[in-house]
Image (spheres, rainbow, N blue to C red):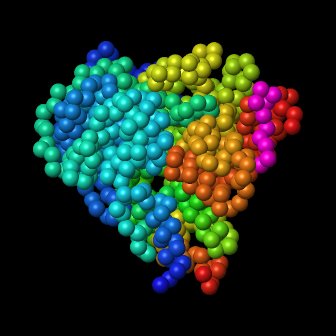
Amino acid sequence: MSNIGSYEERLQGFDWSIAERELDYTPGGFINIGWYCSDRICRLGKGGKLALLWEDAQGNEKQYTYDDLRRCSNTIATFLQGLGIQPGERVCLFMDRAPELYIGFVGILKMGAVAQPLFSAFGDESLWTRLDNAQTTAIVTQKKHVLKVRKIKDKLPHLKHVIVVDAPQSALKEGEISFNLDEAPKVDEFDVYPSTAETPSVLHYTSGTTGQPKGAQHVHYSLVSQYLTSKWVLDLQPDDIYWCNADPGWVTGTSYGIIGPWANGVTQAVLDSGFGTERWYAFIQKYRITVWYSAPTAIRLLMREGTEVAKRFDLSSLRHLASVGEPLNAEAVIWSKEAYGLQFHDTFWQTETGCMVITNYPGMPIKPGSMGKPFPGITATVLNPRTHEPVNQTGVVGLIALRPGWPSMIRGYWNNPTGYANKFRNGWYLCGDRASIDGDGYYWFVGRDDDVINTGGHLVGPFEIESALLEHPAVAESAAVAKPDPLNMEVVKAFITLKPGFEPGDDLELDIMNFIRKKLSPLAMPQEIEFTQGLPKTRSGKIMRRVLRAQEFGEPVGDISTLMDE
Amino acid sequence: MDELKKAVREYVVREYIEEGDDREVNDTTPLISGGIVDSFSMVSLKRFLERKYQIQIPDAQATPEAFDSVTKIAELVRRFKPDA
């Protein structure tokens, strides 16, 4: 029997207080995600239960019980307090999927600071943009990533502490601090910060069409919906061994890679390693993974290797599969049934929603290719793009919109009230995606409604790429747009005009690709570059990305009456 | 000395290992599953191989498994250019 039981019955009279009661939370009272993920589970008598099974690329293993998690997070919280870090200050986690990342997240929340996880593959410029914007006080990182921090530290006046978890003090430079969790004396008692519902908790950066990435500000009350969606959608049950592929540098990796499973007292496994079909299957087999939350790009990579590889491993422990990041194509749903005997359940949500909002549920029939239905407590619709009124017709494409008010919705963008206000129309929050609804109430994803590029489930903003491209000595002007891709749904394509004296060519193309990869991230690297004599612009000189994007997608270009005559 | 493997190894170290990062890359070091080259960055590595050896590697053969070590990459390149 699944946790949710009947979706239709759950819709009747749904109230988020269901989760509040299960969490013993009293409105207006104490709520601290870090405490709920560790101390509370121990108080429920599960201190000896495994919280984290961790393995890295070299096969090194570590295990932590919930009591270990409680004491280790106390230790990190105490260490950060000792540095003088105050509640509300931003502490960045910039590392691979080491145990210190997961436990550090819990520790930061327990001492009242705001956790700011960032993807460790970010280049120094992407890192600087986000640390500068957040006025981050401290960064916790690893030896191999501290080099990027060193490059930008002088340009970050608010950054007071650089903490390295895997290097002795002797290997560090002035102003850097070594912290070894394994060797640090464990702290058994810690006064957890008395946060309440609206106390800031997590700051995740997400990309938009215009400007630099925005900091999505979450609060501790988000726990309520992250807890319940983990229980009902991922169907996490006491004996499960759960594996979430997402990196905590992105919201899936915190909402469902830390908060959801641990608030539910479930054992989770983490593989700190890159992609490898056999490596992944061996991991599932070894740890007897029961619930697997993955992503379409990964699933399509596994599909390329075929079902035969899957059959060579004992994957019989798997009982529930889910996917997030981009629409899961029907072929992948059908293939997973063939390969694993189970279908992936697609889930739709985003950084700003903090939790799954439209999704497929255990026990509910899956329509392959569909996003599923709104979670109970989420009022969703599709809006007419012009009037911003609900479409109210089946099969008609509109803008996915949500009524604000669910617990984990962001409370704003960091220092950007205008950007936040622009996300609303007629009292609806706009997700920035287009979809239609069929006669059974299932949602069907169509695409983005803006210039943001969804590559491998990650949103990349064109402005950030174009700004970085201009720093390359050969680039005069550029436009970054989405290009359809069978593996990643979309990839970045850059249209570039060159400065005098530079000639298009393979060497230059590769040089520009690597330039962006190192400066921003592998996700932002254009996978194709088209050198051109000019870019389509409005008469006011603004580059019309939508014209280029439409060309790539083979779609009508639309209104080009404002196009500048060449 | 296998010049192909040497060229691939040097390119990987130069482009994918940060300056000051002391990780070593030998012919069997896991590149993709080891987290040195991610699946997105594989595209620039593929482009490098195609340009340097004047070959076209079909996307279907450019899998994470085929790019997972210097030795595997050399085998892949030699499928298209045996004398490389």
Is A534 covered by the magenta stretch?
yes
Question: Whole-percent x and y of residue A407?
Answer: 43, 23
The reply, left or right, for residue A381 in relation to residue B5 is right
- Tell me if I can see residue A51 in this picture: no
In the displayed structure, B20 sits above or below A86; it is below
Question: Whole-percent x and y of residue A324?
Answer: 52, 44
In the displayed structure, A237 sits above or below A212; it is below
What is the chief secondary structure element of the magenta stretch? loop
Q: Nearer the viewer, residue A239 or B75?
A: B75
Q: Nearer the viewer, residue A400 or B47?
A: B47
Say which residue appears at 34% left-offset and 59% top-offset: A56
Residue A283 lies in what quarter of the image? Answer: bottom left
The reply, left or right, for residue A467 in relation to residue A411 is right
* Residue reaching furthest to the front: A501
Q: Please count the marks in the image.
A: 0
Which image quarter holds the C terminus of chain A?
Answer: top right
Point out the stretch of residues depicted in magenta. A532-541
Residue A151 lies in what quarter of the image? Answer: top left
Question: Whole-percent x and y of residue A245?
Answer: 44, 50
In the displayed structure, A534 sits above or below A354; it is below
Is A199 covered by the magenta stretch?
no
